[in-house]
Every structure is written in C-alpha cells, then in structure tokens.
Amino acid sequence: MAGFALRSTAAWRFVRLSSLLRSSVSVPGIHTTASPLMGATVEQFEEAKNKLSTLKKDPGNEVKLKIYALFKQSTQGPCNTPKPGMLDFVNKAKWDAWKSLGSISQDEARQEYCDLIGSLLTAEGQGPAQVAAKPAGGGASYETLLVTTEDGITTIKLNRPAKKNAITTEMYDEIIAALDQAAKDDCVITVFTGAGDFYCSGNDLTNFTKIPEDGVEAMARSAGDLLRKYVKAYIDFPKPLIAVVNGPAVGVSVTVLGLFDLVYATERATFHTPFSQLGQSAEGCSSYTFPKMMGNAKASEMLLFNKKLTAAQACSLGLVTEVFPDSSFQSEVWSRLKAYAQLPRNSLALSKQLIRSIEKEQLYAVNDAEVERLMERWTSDECFNAIMSFFQAKAKL
Ligand SMILES: CCC/C=C/C(=O)SCCNC(=O)CCNC(=O)[C@H](O)C(C)(C)COP(=O)([O-])OP(=O)([O-])OC[C@H]1O[C@@H](n2cnc3c(N)ncnc32)[C@H](O)[C@@H]1OP(=O)([O-])[O-]
C-alpha cells in the first residue's frame, strides 16, 4: 500500500497572493440588494476585499486558491471560461478551484468569501472581523472548515471544494473539535453543510495511503480510534443538529445523517454508500439507523449493494426530511433555520436529548462493532485493490 503513486495537485504552489489581489480590483456584476439571509452585502464584500491586503501572514496556496475562486464566483458567477492547457499550471489550478464551486450563487459565494477572510483576520488577532458572520468558538480557526456563528446558528461548513469535501484525517479532528465547540457555545441550532457543488465525497481515500512505520495494522487501529471518536461526537451532540445537503453525498457523510435531527437536501443531492465496492463495510451507526428508518430490504440495497439514491428517494425512505428545488434551496432552507433558531434554546436541547437518550447505549455498541469490522476490512486485499483502482483512475463511482 505504501507504494501508491498518488495524483498530485502541486500546481497551486505557484499561486501568489499578489496575483489574487490584482484579480480583486474590480467587482462587476455584483447585485446590490443581497438578502441578508442568503449572503453578505456588497459593502461587506468590499470591506472583506480591502481587508485582504492587511493580512500579515501568507495563508498558504490552498487558501489563496479558495479566495481566488470565491472572488471569481462572487463577481462573475459560475466558471464559464475554457480550461487552460495541462502545462499552464498556475491558470489550471485557478480554473480548477473556480470550477469546483459549481453553480453556487453569487450571494452564497460572497458570503463564503467574507467568512473566509473574516476567519483569517481573526486568526491573526485582527478581529473580531466586521466583514460577516463571526467565526465561532472564540476565534478558533480551522484549515479545512469554515465555522461561523450568526443569529443563534453555528454553521460548520466542509471547505475542500476542489476535493469534493473529502474528509482527511486532519478534517475528522477538526470536525470533532468544531462539534465540541458548538456543543458549548450560545447557539440554538448547529448546521452542517459543504462548500462548492458537493456536500461531501466521504472518507478521503488518501487516508489509506499514509502507512506508519509500524505497518498496516497500526494504521487500521489509529483510523479505527479516530472513526469511533468521530461518530461518538455525533451520537453525543446535545443540541439540534441539521444537515443542509447542498449536493451529492458519499460514504461516511451519508451514514452519519442517521444521527442528525433534520436533513434538508437540494433536489440535486444524491446519497451513495459504496462500501462493498470499496471492500469495506457500514459505519456511522448506519447498520442500525438505516434498517430502523427504511426497513431491512431498502437498507441492504444501499449498504450492501451500493444503490445510489436520489434526494426524492432518500426523502421517501426517511433519510431526508425535505427536498427543495436547487434554485431556491439556500434561501428557503436558511429562512426556515433562522426561524427555528428563535425557539427557546434549552427546551430544544432537552427535547433532543430525551429522544437520543433512549438509544444512546445501543448506538455506542453499534459504533464499536462497526469500527471493529472496519479495522479488519482495511487490512484486507479487497479494500487494498479497490483503493488502488481509484488512484489509478480506473474506477469512479
Ligand atoms: C473512515 C470511515 C469509512 C469511510 C467510508 C467512506 O466514506 S467510503 C466513500 C469514499 N469515497 C469515495 O469512494 C468517493 C471517491 N470519489 C469519486 O468517486 C469521485 O471523485 C466523485 C464521484 C466523488 C466525484 O467525481 P467528479 O468526476 O465529479 O470529480 P473528481 O473525481 O474529478 O474529483 C475532484 C478531485 O477530488 C478528488 N476526490 C474526490 N473524492 C475523493 C475522495 N473520497 N478521496 C480522495 N480524493 C477524492 C479526486 O481525486 C479529484 O482530485 P484531482 O484529480 O483533482 O487531484
């Protein structure tokens, strides 16, 4: 396994902050009447743009590419320019980053742009930034997430759109930390969503390629410990937890949905758990929650036979609460969430805990059993061959 030849995106190493600033000179095409529910105002966007030049530290190329992409999406909409040639490394990296935002609206991109600059400024002690929603957790900043608190809602947004928000080891740790912080903050509800056109493509398969010196078994043990802790963070989460599924969802991002209190999805979302195809097995307590919510036969179609569900099918099986048209998804869902966040905080949390307490011990036991099974699967030839195929680009879901 250690010998995998991984695909590299080293091109972004060449992107310079100065070129980002140059690209931020004009803002054609911005609507001046953005709804505060949907995105930052033009004034906030302009302020964020101006504050970008006050950053003292270089935020790193991956972040700079995100800033570039969000700027382009905010000002020009979805990427519509021809793909640069293979050898034009810098422009290809920038084009990829812009393209990865898919069809998210200019309002939404502007909000993400402001959130990102705000979190960078706060991390440098320049905050609290006045550019948009304030970063949650007393200024905690994350490499792979955007976490903000506004109007009683803490939002945890997976923020690796170029990799379809695949969850790296670092990201599991950050999500656990963000959930822990949200559990203790003043917010009424917590929302989980993804940046760009995907909700999440599941476990980042490169996690399996980082073999420690003490071998594959040690890698499987430490991955198992992390997964157990990750799923437990959802089981134990004490407040209403709501998924805003903004696009396709794969693997572990689908299975843990059974531990959310509400799941709102765009009609564009799909739900796919290709565990057998990957030589793996179910996790996220789905071997218990899925049969409970949709019956054994439908759960087996998903968890054993890799059936990908549309949003409408997932809704009819109880995995999704409600499906919205893609064009009005963000505005409809966020106005609803804002109204929910006006409800009494303690009453909501206590009612959620009552519902969860009935099966908490059961969920811990299921989590343990699933992790045990997976630790064995991760050392199997079936799993090894499936992951090799993915990186050799022979197989895609
Ligand atoms: C731990 C607990 C157990 C967990 C179980 C699970 O979650 S099982 C489920 C595990 N999940 C899977 O098996 C999903 C595997 N992924 C796929 O099948 C497809 O990428 C797709 C259908 C998600 C999107 O297809 P698309 O044609 O729309 O987009 P694209 O393919 O061009 O992707 C853009 C870039 O993102 C990269 N990237 C994306 N996802 C992952 C990932 N998970 N990993 C790593 N990288 C990933 C991709 O390589 C590419 O990188 P590049 O070349 O630019 O350097």
Image: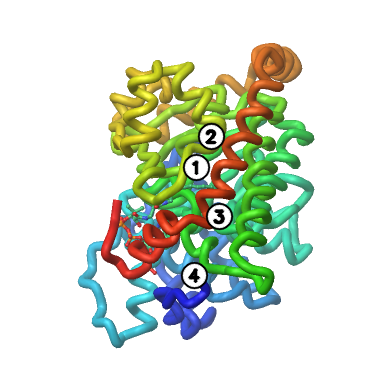
Name the mark nearer the viewer: 4 or 3. 4
Residue 262 visible to an observer of this rendering: yes
Q: Is residue 176 above or below residue 142?
A: above
Q: Is residue 25 toward the left or the right of residue 344 in the image?
A: left
**Mark 4 = which residue?**
1
The residue closer to the viewer here, 8 or 303, is 303
Task: State which tag comes first along the sequence, 4 or 2.
Answer: 4
Where's residue 373, x and y in %?
A: 56, 41
For badge 4, the amino acid type reads Met
Quadrant in the picture for residue 254: top left
Q: Is residue 397 above or below residue 143?
A: above
For badge 1, the amino acid type reads Val
Quadrant in the picture for residue 5: bottom left
Tag 3 secondary structure: helix
Where's residue 262, x and y in %?
A: 51, 23
For badge 3, the amino acid type reads Cys
Q: Is mark 1 within 8 Å of ligand 1?
A: yes
**Mark 3 = which residue?**
114
Q: Which mark is residue 256?
A: 2
Separation of marks 2 and 1 at Cα, in angstroms: 6 Å
Name the mark nearer the viewer: 4 or 1. 4
**Mark 1 = which residue?**
252
Name the mark nearer the viewer: 3 or 1. 1
For badge 2, the amino acid type reads Val
